[in-house]
Image (cartoon, rainbow, N blue to C red):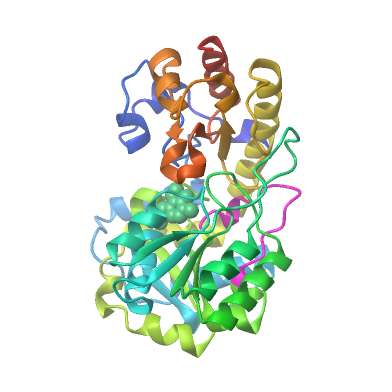
Amino acid sequence: MGMDSLSIDPLARLRKRRSAKWRTFPDDVLPLPVAEMDFPLAEPVAKVLREAIDRSDTGYAAPTRDLADAVANYARRAWDWSIDTDGIRTVADVGIGMVEVLRRVVAAGDRVVISPPVYEPFSWWIREVGAHVVEAPLADAPSSDASEGWRLDLDALESEFSEGAAAYLLCNPHNPMGLVHRREELTALAELADRYGVHVLADEIHAPLVLPGAEFVPFLSVSQEARRWGFSFLSASKGWNLAGLKAATVITADPAPKRYVDRLSPHSLYRTGHLGVLATVAAFNDGDPWLADVVDTLDHNRRHLDALLTELLPAVRYRHPDAGFLAWLDFRALGWGDDPSAHILDTARVALNAGHRYGTSGIGWARLNFGCSPQTLTEALTRIAAAS
Ligand SMILES: Cc1ncc(COP(=O)(O)O)c(C=O)c1O
């Protein structure tokens, strides 16, 4: 186990990938934005995909219980969370699942709350259903101590909920800084949701990638209030790097939210990728050893990133991530303007995500993807430091 067993491909080979991360920028740019990882596919996943191709098995996803069973078994193993498989519904991806559920729980013009800085598409999804985006930003931006910073602002949430909100989009672990919300906060959020009648759509896509030292608490596991108001969205697309294959799940654990999911189009299964379902079942059933290697590698990489920042860019503030492969970096002290990613792309030829897209509190920040080799990370940070 550990980093060596992942044997990450050299850059020249990674550049042959045809996915968004590798086709968006010219070859002199190190791409560290799009949330794809550079690791080789888990062998059990690669095997089912190869076998499907060999059978020319590229039709529609079949109406089986395989995916629901695999997700429920994984949730029990990984988080001691028991899910009734009747409450697990297949959708094409988390974004589509979120939008389809939003369509059913909000009306045009309703207010939907998010906690920026947060994954940029949250606000697109809300606008897509004709609702208004309302911000209750995270509290406690990190100061100089990289082990501290960021939490849900329960007072701000209560204030927005009390003014009439139809839904809240929870991100746990929270992209872009890899924050794992604590059980007490989730319990308090569920109480607020129940008091003010707010549906909670919990995007838990990064949960399989929680790193040592942090504990992922599934929202629906915290209380009856959470189950009454909550929807969880889970997939293997971040954990096992399957985003292009299109398979995800929406989970409910109470008849009230399940009624909304039951109204999803009966066609949603046929809109899901057949290869995605096969790969996701293999990932959740047989992907634990590979995932353990990835978690080791990411744990190593985040410590490597801490060391590189301390040595090369000490003015950049950030909070050491608890989960995933994303780091949220505050470049404001360097005077690189509202969008440091533009300066970094121009001068260092390293691509990061522009922080201002994650909400106004992201002005002067940028998001870096460390799901790569330690060498790529060193190269990226060395180039960025030389640009200052
Ligand atoms: C928090 C979060 N939600 C959703 C997604 C996208 O998921 P999907 O491709 O299943 O829509 C991502 C991708 O990076 C993400 O970080």
Is any atom of residue 20 visible in this view?
A: yes
The extreme bottom residue here reads 255
Q: Residue at x 49, y 68 (%)?
A: 168
Where's the C terminus, which quadrant?
A: top right
Residue 40 lies, with reference to residue 243, above or below; the image says above
Residue 296 in the figure: left or right of residue 339: right
Q: Residue at x 57, y 68 (%)?
A: 159
Q: Nearer the viewer, residue 80 or 169?
A: 169
- Indicate the position of residue 47 as horizontal and vertical percent values: 43, 50
Residue 200 lies, with reference to residue 376, above or below; the image says below
Where's the N terminus, which quadrant?
A: top right
Find out whether residue 208 is within the magenta segment.
yes
Magenta range:
205-219
The extreme top residue here reads 386
Residue 186 lies, with reference to residue 373, above or below; the image says below
Residue 85 in the figure: left or right of residue 16: right
Is any atom of residue 92 visible in this view?
A: no
Q: Residue at x 56, y 30 (%)?
A: 7
- Indicate the position of residue 186 as horizontal and vertical percent values: 65, 68
- Indicate the position of residue 256 as horizontal and vertical percent values: 48, 88
- Indicate the position of residue 59 as horizontal and vertical percent values: 23, 63
Most frequent secondary structure within the magenta stretch = loop
Q: Residue at x 57, y 20 (%)?
A: 334
Q: Nearer the viewer, residue 51 or 11?
A: 11
